[in-house]
Amino acid sequence: MTNVSNELCFLILNIRAYIGFKIKCFISFVLKGHIFRNKNFLDYQKKNQVIKLHLGSTYNIEGFFNSQIIGKNPIDITNKLPFKNDLFEIIFSTHVIEHLHKKEIIFFLKESFRVLKPGGKNIILTPSLDKIINILYINKDIDSKNKLLERQKKWAKEKEINNCSYINGIFRNYGHRFIINFDFLKSETKKIGYSKINVVKNDEIPDIEVNNYIKKYKNDEGWNLETESYILEK
């Protein structure tokens, strides 16, 4: 989106992307949502004593109920989560909430709080505004900066990526809507009622299967540099 030539082009691209995504979501919900998803969840509950939810599951995690909005078990996290209160030990998502608008993120945090058991954890991995700014503008680690810029070069249609390109890209490209940081999450989760929020290293998340998933599928150095792991506890 940072390469569009004018406002009309920007609007056309956004409308086309929005309509295409909504059509895919509709087809997915018709074919796999509601009855089939609910049946799959009941089968999952029968096989697992510890109930855990994985949102945005491009790849499945063992022991989790895996959901992808345009795949198997579709769940739209901008709407009320289709689960009863106080159910899950863990809710896990990686690089999902940055695709939501600010109010949608807050709504998702509220819904996650509702369906978590007391003491349950909402584990959120997402690009961090704090980490990105520190690497690009504050720290003097040129190697980390180059790795971060190189990561975006894979996705952007530009031969050279600089700080300006990266910051604009992280906000406007890839369907991103709102990039968070620790202060934002701390403020919003306190209002909702979460008991604590912690930041942990990306390879030190308190779930073995999640750690295995990250090591297998998220081992890109640039990804680790821009990603923060937040643990929100009910």
Image (tube, rainbow, N blue to C red):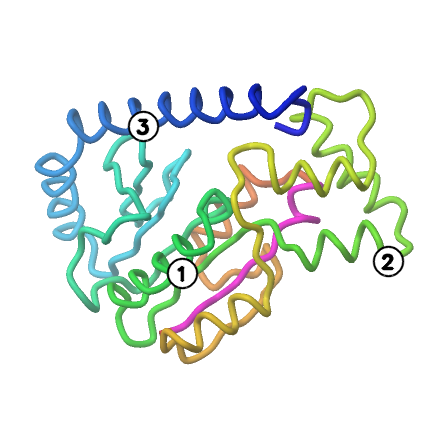
Residue 22: assigned label: 3
Quadrant where the C terminus sits is: bottom left
Residue 139: assigned label: 2
Q: Residue at x 12, y 38 (%)?
A: 34
Q: Which residues are magenta?
A: 222-233
Q: Quadrant of residue 110?
A: bottom left
Considering the numbered disc 1 on the image, is that residue within a helix, a strand or a loop? helix
Camera-near label (2 vs 1) is: 1
186 or 230, nearer to the observer: 186
Q: Which three-letter amino acid code belongs to the residue tagged 1?
A: Ile
Q: Which three-letter amino acid code belongs to the residue tagged 3?
A: Lys
Residue 205: give x, y in percent of width and height. Answer: 51, 60
C-alpha gap between disc 1 and disc 3: 22 Å
Q: Residue at x 45, y 48 (%)?
A: 101
Please say if 2 is above or below 190: above
Q: Please give the residue where the numbered disc 1 appears in the rendered image.
A: 106
Residue 152: give x, y in percent of width and height. Answer: 70, 33
